[in-house]
Amino acid sequence: MEWKFRSDLPIYAQIVEQFRQSIVSGKLSPGQRLESVRDLSMEAGVNPNTMQRALQELEREGLVYTQRTAGRFVSEDAAVIERGKRAMAMEKIREFLSAMNSLGYSREEILSLLSEEKEEENNADS
């Protein structure tokens, strides 16, 4: 996994977000074993406690689980993964709508812009 961190969010929250993205997009497969906390923290260049905190949050959400003595694994529960995917999509939609509202666009104007963009994209694909 390629780790990129910004200064606007705590690092553990960014790690959680990157794992969520990898899980819901299928980059990490259901049932896939994760590397150890030590290996992941070295790879990401973060303190092991930070990585542990992020993985515990993912466990709390049900996106990963621990098997005693075997390590951590990506959830195999398709419903949990789909809920995570939908939650991420809704968050992105809220961010988009907020940004568009701050630019002064009404909901109708936003829908019109989206429709225009989709039409242009369809024309470009043809």
Image: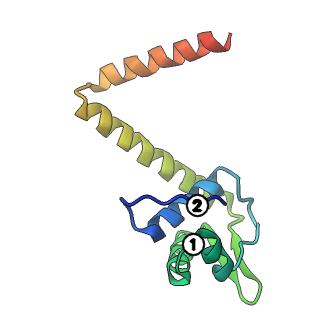
Asked whether the beta carbons under mark 1 and mark 2 sit within 8 Å of each other, the answer is yes
Question: In the shown orientation, is residue 35 left or right of residue 55?
Answer: right
Which quadrant is home to the C terminus?
top right
The amino acid at mark 2 is Trp
For the point 60% across and 76% down, the residue is 41
| Label annotation for residue 15 | none
Residue 104 position within the rendered picture, expressed as x and y whole percent measured from the top left: 22, 27
Residue 118 position within the rendered picture, expressed as x and y whole percent measured from the top left: 52, 18
Instruction: Name the one closer to the observer, 22 or 6.
Output: 6
Residue on which the image places disc 2: 3
Q: For the residue carrying disc 1, how many other residues have a C-alpha within 10 Å: few (<14), some (14-19), or many (20+)?
A: few
Judging from the image, what secondary structure is the residue with disc 1 in?
loop
Position above or below: 74 against 41: above
For the point 74% across and 59% down, the residue is 29
For the point 43% across and 58% down, the residue is 6
The amino acid at mark 1 is Gly
Quadrant of the image occupied by residue 51: bottom right
Position above or below: 49 against 81: below
Judging from the image, what secondary structure is the residue with disc 2 in?
loop
Question: In the shown orientation, is residue 67 left or right of residue 102?
Answer: right
Residue 112 position within the rendered picture, expressed as x and y whole percent measured from the top left: 38, 17
Which quadrant is home to the N terminus?
bottom right
Residue 99 position within the rendered picture, expressed as x and y whole percent measured from the top left: 31, 37
Residue on which the image places disc 1: 45
Instruction: Name the one closer to the observer, 125 or 94.
Output: 125
Mark 1 or 2, nearer chain start: 2
Instruction: Name the one closer to the observer, 17 or 41.
Output: 41
